[in-house]
Amino acid sequence: MTDADSAEVVRQRCHDFTVMHTEVPIYARIVAGMAADDDAIALLRHAAKGQARPVLLLAALHELTMRHPETPAAAWFLPGAAGDGDPWPDVRRSVEDHWDELRSVVATRTTQTNEVNRATYVRAMLSRAAADLPDVPLTVVELGASAGFLLGFDGYRVRVGDVTVGPSGSLVECVAENRGAPVRLDLPPIAARVGIDANPVGPHDDAALRWLRACIWPEMPGRLERFDAAVAHLRNDPPHVVRADMVDGLAPVIAERRAAGSHLVVFSSWALTYVARARRTGVADVLAEAATDGPVSWVTAEPPGCVPGLPDQDVLDGDDRLTATVVGARSWRDGREMPAQVWGTVHGHGNWIDFTR
Ligand SMILES: C[S@@+](CC[C@H](N)C(=O)[O-])C[C@H]1O[C@@H](n2cnc3c(N)ncnc32)[C@H](O)[C@@H]1O
């Protein structure tokens, strides 16, 4: 264990969580309990380097309650959980009863957010990328697709402001407020779609899906319900997700999967940011090469400064620099790269869209 994860540092991370996340009062009270409990801090310090954060133990506890609904902590982790009082005595009992299981999960897992509601901005991004080629079918490739939830974008009912698309009977409903210019959600036909992920999650990998679910905060209205609906959708119609590095694996996936005569649209949502900065230009190199065979667009929803060649610094000011998700595109037409475009910002979970330009 390094000093970077000393008990003092971990306790401070817990205090920071309680101050920053008043929107989830039960989670904030659980984390306040962790901060004051030497055993809970010690448990969290079994995490991999840099991962000893309260969200990891929250996810481990959430996952535990899914496997053991009888454990005292479970009542505090139900979808849409609400309630006054101090959850820590119940949570503490579950920690004691399941110490070894929790230690093993904390030591081996890391948290990650898979948010189906991001399909709101994915749909808006794809529509905008296709606006100049409305009749050309799309080959859609997602980088960092995980289980492939966002690749189901056209199977979901999606509403952005007063524009609604998608099958009216869909199990999955995604909703965003429109805070900016009008957005389009219409799409050309989808000729092919595929995801790439270093660790794809299969539609019947119950343990891995349970962990992705556990990483969602139950107090946030509708999120767990939407996730469960998306899992059912995924099992009916699983997208193909290739296990590969998104930079090294991109060219082979394009060679194998690109539909003849289609517009290749590659997108990423909170995924390119996990690739080392120096390697990210490799995506553009592959796409420039692919542009000799037809139109190509690379659309991204990533934190500011993440995407090489996207001049996104002037779209943000103040606090936005820390919290925003920036949406933009690089594109190639007739074999030549067009000027990069920054379209605006979106909420990190797709709750609002603000296409300013
Ligand atoms: C935070 S999740 C985002 C999932 C989804 N795109 C979304 O927005 O809900 C990031 C995903 O990127 C994947 N990933 C990270 N680095 C990768 C790489 N070098 N190549 C392929 N996938 C990678 C992870 O395995 C994970 O599934």
Image (spheres, rainbow, N blue to C red):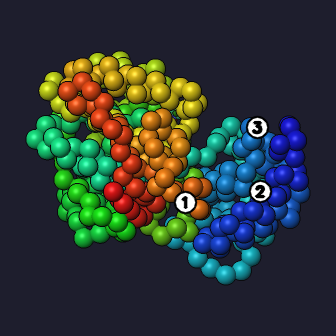
Vertical relation: 247 (above or below) 25 = above
Q: Which residue is mark 2?
A: 13
Mark 2 falls on what kind of element?
A: helix
Q: In front of the other: label 1 or label 2?
A: 1
Q: Is residue 25 left or right of residue 308?
A: right
Vertical relation: 232 (above or below) 258 = below
Vertical relation: 140 (above or below) 119 = above
Q: Which residue is mark 3?
A: 49
Distance of label 2 from label 3 (alpha carbons) = 14 Å
- Is ligand 1 less than 8 Å from the beta carbon at label 3? no
Give the image location of residue 331, x and y in percent.
30, 35
Q: Which residue is mark 1?
A: 317
Residue in view at x 45 percent, y 51 percent: 326
10 Å crowding of disc 1: few (<14), some (14-19), many (20+): few
Distance of label 1 from label 2 (alpha carbons) = 26 Å
- Mark 3 residue type: Lys
Q: Nearer the viewer, residue 251 or 89?
A: 251
Q: Point out the tag, 2 or 3, that comes first from the N-terminus.
A: 2
- Mark 2 residue type: Arg
Q: Are marks 2 and 3 in contact (CB under 8 Å)?
A: no
- Is ligand 1 less than 8 Å from the beta carbon at label 1? no
Q: In front of the other: label 1 or label 3?
A: 1
Residue in view at x 40 percent, y 55 percent: 344
Residue in view at x 43 percent, y 58 percent: 346
Vertical relation: 22 (above or below) 170 = below
Give the image location of residue 317, x and y in percent.
54, 60
